[in-house]
Amino acid sequence: MTAPHFHGRYRTISASLMLETLGASLSTIKDQDKATDADLGAVLGKSDDRAAAYRHGDADMGAVSLLRGIAAWDGRFANDALALVGFRLVPIEAGTASDAASLTATCALLAKKAKALEDGVIDDDELEEMWPEIEAASRDIDRLRERRRLRLVSNG
């Protein structure tokens, strides 16, 4: 067995794989949005030929362009690349649900999880079945994190 099987989260990811992955995401966005390289470049603050180089995985993107892409396309752009290093991007939607509604979301997840665990294991079909509840509870947790962060900033 190779090292990635033993230490998957801490394995070395090649720069070429990172660039290819970001490029594939840009290609998907280009196709889904029926955009041109010039359109992509306008969002990234680069020329159409530079955007094409990013899309083909031939060029390293700077932080400003990366953050512009994240702001415009959020997880569609960044999540496949972030997954290579064990992370994902989620937008924080502060204030989109009430505290009472958030309890409903959490309890719905707990109910489905308890049902799935009756046999001691959550299989792939059960995971897929509870995915909407997982996402709803996740959004609420992110909302609470953002609410706390805003309090810390305003009290700081």
Image (tube, rainbow, N blue to C red):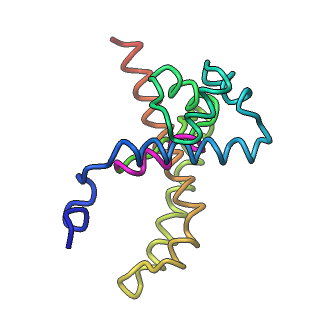
Residue appearing at x 57%, y 34% in the figure: 53
Quarter holding residue 8: bottom left
Q: Position of residue 128 (x, y in %)?
A: 56, 71
Q: Position of residue 44 (x, y in %)?
A: 61, 24
Q: Nearer the viewer, residue 112 or 29?
A: 29
Total labels: the figure holds: 0
Q: Position of residue 151 (x, y in %)?
A: 41, 21
Specify the principal SS of the magenta part.
Answer: helix
- Position of 38 with respect to 85 (left or right) is right
Query: Which residue extends farthest right?
Result: 34
Within the magenta stretch, is there residue 14?
A: no
- Position of 28 with respect to 119 (left or right) is right
**Residue numbers of the magenta segment:** 75-85
The C terminus sits in image quarter: top left
Q: Position of residue 59 (x, y in %)?
A: 48, 32
Residue appearing at x 68%, y 30% in the figure: 40
Residue appearing at x 57%, y 42% in the figure: 56
